[in-house]
Image: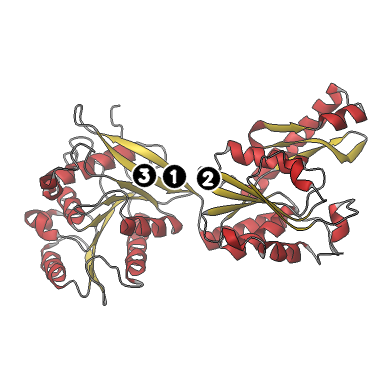
Amino acid sequence: MYFTDRTDAGRRLADRLGHLAALDVTVLGLPRGGVPVAAEVADALGAPLDICVVRKLGVPYRPEVAMGAIGEGGVRVLNDQVLRDARVAPGDLAAVEERERAELERRARRYRGGRRPVPLDGRTVLVVDDGLATGATALAACRVVRARGAARIVFAVPVAPRGWTTRLGGEADETVCVHTPDGFIAVGQFYEDFSATSDEEVVARLAHSRAVHGPVVQESDVRIPLPEGVGTLAGRLAVPEDAHGVVLFAHGSGSGRHSPRNRAVAGALNRAGLGTLLFDLLTEGEAADRRLVFDTPMLAGRLARATEWLAAEPPARGLPLGWFGASTGAAAALWAAAEPVGTAGGGTGARPAAIVSRGGRPDLAHERLARVDAPTLLVVGGRDALVLDLNRKAQAMLRCENRLEVVPGATHLFEEPGALEEVAELAASWFTGHFGRRTAAPDVSTGR
């Protein structure tokens, strides 16, 4: 024996995978036995855990012998040598595949509970099983992961026979194994406890990962159309499964959708179950004109237009929407929130359920503050004296529900340790509280 059980195997495998800790890696376990091993690896790497469902196709009269494997997405891998040696008829192969395909789909539904798979596009994906024998399921798993857009695949197991990497046919970019013994017959001979993993344990392991790392987030690059001849605004939309609202970010002057501070706050909101839309308020052609970054009415119109567009998009349709404004972007949010319903974006008038201002410039929307009707949270750094004074004066003018929060020791950009994390926590609490109390945004059409 070499491993006490799968938990022991996972911890020892994790010791060989420390070099992946700094990467944006996603860990996939092969159900069922690979999931406890993968869960230990995911915990050690601080990475999210999901499953890659594959099923071995066993020879009809010797089911322990793999003649191939199938995976999600219609992936199918056959071992022609085994098929010839075992003289498997096409009809027998089809019957086995039909049975295993039904079981594969059952397991995917059972384990994920209707949730979508973790996105793999452009990611490093670590595929883990409790061992490798023929390599058929491993090969199918790698092909499934590649088909789902993984940029790099690492396949790792606690135990495998010597020369095992050739069985993957080059499908994995990196391979890792703890033990490659002589006299390999079966994976189970190297475990003291190799009892079957239950469906319940797989579900529990996945639930633990979601609790630690947050929900699955579907991300996509988007283009927000403006009136004909003006162009489009580039953005990045991220919506977690079962999201209870989406927040649009209005960036400050000289910034954009790539703002590291807004991205950090957006990531925290995603983990809290909120969707986010980071987008540029100016088109590529307008970005060089510095005068536009202080054109509050124009920027307010862009934010309102993006809100109307988002309200009609499937990922956000029917969900409450909020605005997070930074610096001059906060002024644009307050300006837009004071527009009469139906005029803010020149169209249907999707409205914010709540607003958060980070280091905002409310003075740039001074004449409209009394007409803002969305609950507004003003967050300012304690050492940002000028902006703090502007926000105190603005709060006195607001007639809507509002609150001013001062982050002690923080300057205008909230660069101090822990400052931005406090902003994110305040924002998440404000949005979730008001999204829960407000009705959903209307299901509007942009007329596209």
Q: Secondary structure at mark 1?
A: strand
Position of residue 238 measured from the top left corner of the image (x, y, whole percent): 41, 47
Q: Secondary structure at mark 3?
A: strand
Residue extending farthest top? 90
Q: 10 Å neighbourhood of mark 1: few (<14), some, or many (≥20)?
A: some
Badge 3 is on which residue?
236
Disc number for residue 119: 2
Scheme of colours in the image: secondary structure
Left or right of 239 in this view: 303? left
> Residues under labels 2 and 3: Cα distance?
15 Å
- Vertical side of 445 occupied by 114: above or below: below
Q: What amino acid type should be assigned to the residue bearing mark 3?
A: Arg
Badge 1 is on which residue?
219
Residue extending farthest left? 367
Q: Quadrant of residue 259?
A: bottom left
- 339 and 40: which is toward the camera: 40
Position of residue 40 measured from the top left corner of the image (x, y, whole percent): 66, 63
Left or right of 96 in this view: 256? left
Q: Earlier in the sequence, mark 2 or mark 3?
A: 2
Pointers 2 and 3 in contact (C-beta within 8 Å): no
Q: Secondary structure at mark 2?
A: loop
> Residues under labels 3 and 1: Cα distance?
7 Å
- 49 and 2: which is toward the camera: 2
